[in-house]
Image (cartoon, rainbow, N blue to C red):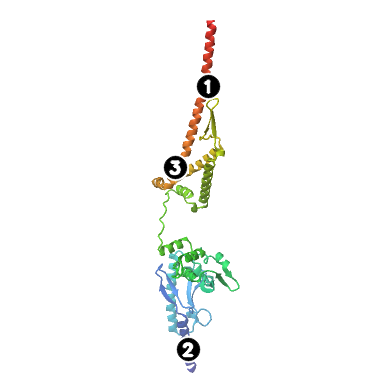
């Protein structure tokens, strides 16, 4: 009888010990997920809830008894019948819960086991600890500390690009050094920390702060936004053609800053303009003028300046090349402009047109003079032929009369 009492006391102690560890380590609770209508578990760091996977892929829910031994089941624990019955009820609930999770995994398109489904469905986000590394920035002797994650928000800037900022790194002191304005850097660092808010300090001049913005390469969009905040009037958007090809041609001939090709076209235009001006000045020198000598009588000679050049003159050929470029440029710009009326109203375009017109007048004069000379030469030849025919007729009449 005494041994029987000791045996009962030992069973009670085991039951109490098991319940204590079960309460302490088994803190998992079931929650209902409203995302897919499936069920998952949330637990503390001390929980030891798992899913045992058999060969068929169907999981069995079990728990750790906290003693470091194998996972326990009702048959392995030497506790009373009432406790065993409670464990059987809990096992039935766990089996039902397992079926709900398995059905949720099947409906979500997973053919893997229940444990794999939970791992895929509730996988935590990976955290990059290297970006949490703190870095020291020394600006003119004043040190600032921030994290790489903060700087990497703007990868196109000087501090946000590792390849750009490495040029200013001091490996001896393990810091970045910038010999720049210290007060301005407080606003620059706040730009990174706030995610794009830029505020100029009150005691910093505008031109100095703009220079710092350009040095740290915060971008033209940030600079334009800063100018708007400072009260500068935003430039009106320049009209562009709707057609993509016309837009490219318009930018090529009208805006030299738009591309490298536009800069080349602008340089060619400037060179042609300078060449045309030089030719115009050289033509006024006496050494390059042309004169025509007319013998009025045997004792009188008249010298007249020939103002109409010939087609073979070098100056005229160079001027023709320049005018061809100007005409081509004007025609292309007119064909690709977004508004033909606005193009014709522009005073600069009117000046370009007026500068081209005199050449065509001169060209028409040259062609007319050449045709007149050809006509005179033809008339002279005809008169000579008629004179010869007339002489032949007179000779024939004289022979017949004799």
Locate the C terminus by quadrant.
top right
> Could you say whether the residue bearing mark 2 is in a helix, strand or loop?
helix
Q: How packed is label 3: few (under 14 Cα within 10 Å), some, or many (20 or more)?
A: few
- Residue at point 48%, 44% (across, down): 329
Using the image as rendered, state which of residue 206 and residue 195 is in the foreground.
206
Residue 92 seen in the current view? no
Of the image marks 3 and 2, the number of the one nearer the N terminus: 2
Residue 64, disc: none
> Could you say whether the residue bearing mark 1 is in a helix, strand or loop?
helix
Residue 354, disc: 3
Residue placed under numbered mark 2 in the picture: 13
Q: How packed is label 1: few (under 14 Cα within 10 Å), some, or many (20 or more)?
A: few
Residue placed under numbered mark 1 in the picture: 381
Q: Residue lying at the far top in this picture: please name it.
A: 402
Q: Residue lying at the far front in this picture: please name it.
A: 299
Pointer 3 with pointer 2, Cβ within 8 A: no
Q: Marks 1/2: CA distance?
A: 146 Å
Horizontal placement of 347 versus 169: left or right?
left
Nearest to the eye among marks 3 and 2: give it: 3
Using the image as rendered, state which of residue 146 and residue 17 is in the foreground.
146
Counting from the top left corner in percent of width and height, residue 249 is at 47, 47
């Amino acid at each position: 009888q005494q041994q029987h009492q000791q045996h009962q006391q030992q069973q009670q102690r085991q039951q109490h010990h098991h319940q204590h560890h079960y309460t302490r380590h088994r803190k998992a609770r079931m929650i209902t997920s409203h995302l897919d209508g499936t069920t998952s578990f949330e637990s503390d760091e001390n929980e030891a809830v798992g899913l045992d996977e058999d060969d068929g892929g169907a999981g069995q829910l079990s728990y750790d008894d906290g003693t470091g031994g194998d996972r326990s089941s009702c048959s392995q624990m030497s506790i009373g019948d009432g406790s065993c019955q409670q464990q059987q009820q809990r096992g039935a609930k766990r089996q039902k819960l397992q079926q709900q999770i398995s059905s949720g995994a099947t409906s979500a398109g997973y053919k893997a086991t229940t444990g794999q489904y939970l791992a895929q469905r509730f996988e935590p986000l990976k955290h990059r600890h290297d970006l949490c590394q703190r870095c020291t920035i020394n600006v003119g002797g004043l040190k600032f500390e921030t994290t790489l994650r903060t700087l990497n928000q703007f990868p196109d800037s000087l501090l946000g690009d590792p390849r750009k900022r490495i040029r200013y790194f001091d490996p001896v002191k393990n810091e970045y050094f910038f010999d720049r304005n210290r007060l301005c850097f407080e606003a620059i660092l706040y730009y990174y920390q706030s995610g794009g808010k830029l505020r100029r300090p009150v005691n910093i001049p505008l031109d100095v702060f703009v220079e710092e913005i350009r040095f740290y390469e915060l971008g033209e969009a940030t600079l334009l936004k800063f100018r708007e905040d400072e009260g500068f009037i935003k430039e009106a958007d320049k009209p562009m053609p709707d057609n993509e090809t016309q837009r490219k041609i318009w930018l090529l001939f009208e805006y030299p800053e738009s591309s490298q090709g536009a800069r080349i076209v602008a340089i060619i235009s400037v060179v042609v303009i300078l060449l045309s001006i030089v030719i115009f000045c050289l033509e006024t020198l006496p050494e390059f003028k042309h004169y025509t000598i007319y013998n009025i009588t045997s004792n009188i000679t008249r010298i007249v300046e020939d103002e109409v050049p010939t087609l073979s003159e070098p100056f005229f050929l160079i001027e023709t090349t320049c005018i061809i470029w100007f005409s081509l440029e004007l025609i292309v710009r007119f064909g690709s402009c977004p508004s033909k009326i606005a193009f014709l109203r522009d005073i600069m375009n009117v000046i370009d047109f007026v500068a081209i017109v005199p050449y065509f007048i001169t060209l028409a004069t040259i062609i007319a003079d050449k045709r007149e000379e050809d006509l005179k030469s033809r008339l002279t030849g005809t008169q000579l032929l008629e004179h010869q025919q007339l002489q032949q007729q007179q000779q024939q009449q004289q022979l017949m009369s004799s």
